[in-house]
Amino acid sequence: MRLVLIADTHVPKRARDLPGPLWAAIDDADVVIHAGDWVDVPMLDALAGRSARLIACYGNNDGPELRKRLPEIAYAELDGLRLAVVHETGPATGREERCAARFPDVDVLVFGHSHIPWDSTASTGLRLLNPGSPTDRRRQPYATFLTAETAGGELTGVTLHRLPPRRG
């Protein structure tokens, strides 16, 4: 099963649309995971319309209309892999153990908020992934997203994709 992981799209505040290479990855994916900060309902509708399956939550910049349609934490099982999606996880220091305590029955936690790509594993085996942002790189050298694959309860092929700089 092919996955695309994104967060912090901030459309239309930080960009008019998602970058073309990300849309191409979304079109090829079996599951798209979005960890919040959509900002606008049309982006949710567009992504839902193009995704074979969408697993998503809302973020701190998402207003009442998005919060009506999305949970604060999304849970799913993909080929035996137990997944949770949340926007905020707090400070980087102590993140692995704090999240392992908060999500004891989860194999992978996808999160956003910082716009900083993250891939680590807690002592319990919980894998924490932040795809960065495809539209607002902040202090990062590139805008980014993640792809991965899952089969038989295992997550493999986690790849961070750098997006080309936006033009004018």
Image (cartoon, rainbow, N blue to C red):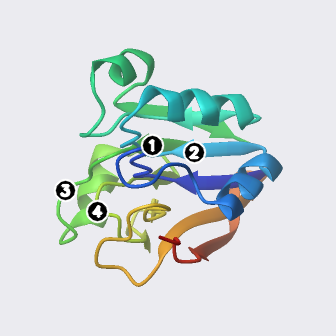
Q: CA gap, disc 1 to disc 2?
A: 8 Å
One can see residue 34 in this view: yes
**SS assignment at label 4:** loop
Name the front one of labels 2 and 3: 2
- The amino acid type, in three-letter code, at marker 4 is Ser
Q: Is residue 85 above or below residue 14?
A: above
Of label 3 and label 1, which has the lower sequence position?
1
Residue 114 disc label: 4
Answer left or right for 7 relative to 77.
left
Residue at x-position 52% and y-position 52%: 107
Residue at x-position 52% and y-position 69%: 144
Residue indicated by mark 2: 33
Of label 4 and label 2, which has the lower sequence position?
2
User: In which quarter of the view is residue 60 placed?
Assistant: top left
Q: CA gap, disc 3 to disc 1?
A: 14 Å
- The amino acid type, in three-letter code, at marker 1 is Val
Q: CA gap, disc 2 to disc 3?
A: 20 Å
- The amino acid type, in three-letter code, at marker 2 is Ile
User: Residue lying furthest front in this view?
Assistant: 168
The reply to whether dot 3 and dot 4 touch (C-beta < 8 Å) is no
- The residue carrying pointer 2 sits among few (fewer than 14), some (14 to 19) or many (20 or more) residues within 10 Å by Cα, namely many
Q: CA gap, disc 4 to disc 2?
A: 17 Å
- The residue carrying pointer 4 sits among few (fewer than 14), some (14 to 19) or many (20 or more) residues within 10 Å by Cα, namely many
Name the front one of labels 3 and 4: 4
Residue 90 disc label: 3
Of label 3 and label 4, which has the lower sequence position?
3
**Position of residue 79 measured from the top left corner of the image (x, y, whole percent):** 75, 43
Residue indicated by mark 1: 85
Of label 1 and label 4, which has the lower sequence position?
1
Total number of numbered labels? 4
- The residue carrying pointer 3 sits among few (fewer than 14), some (14 to 19) or many (20 or more) residues within 10 Å by Cα, namely few
Q: Is residue 54 above or below residue 149?
A: above
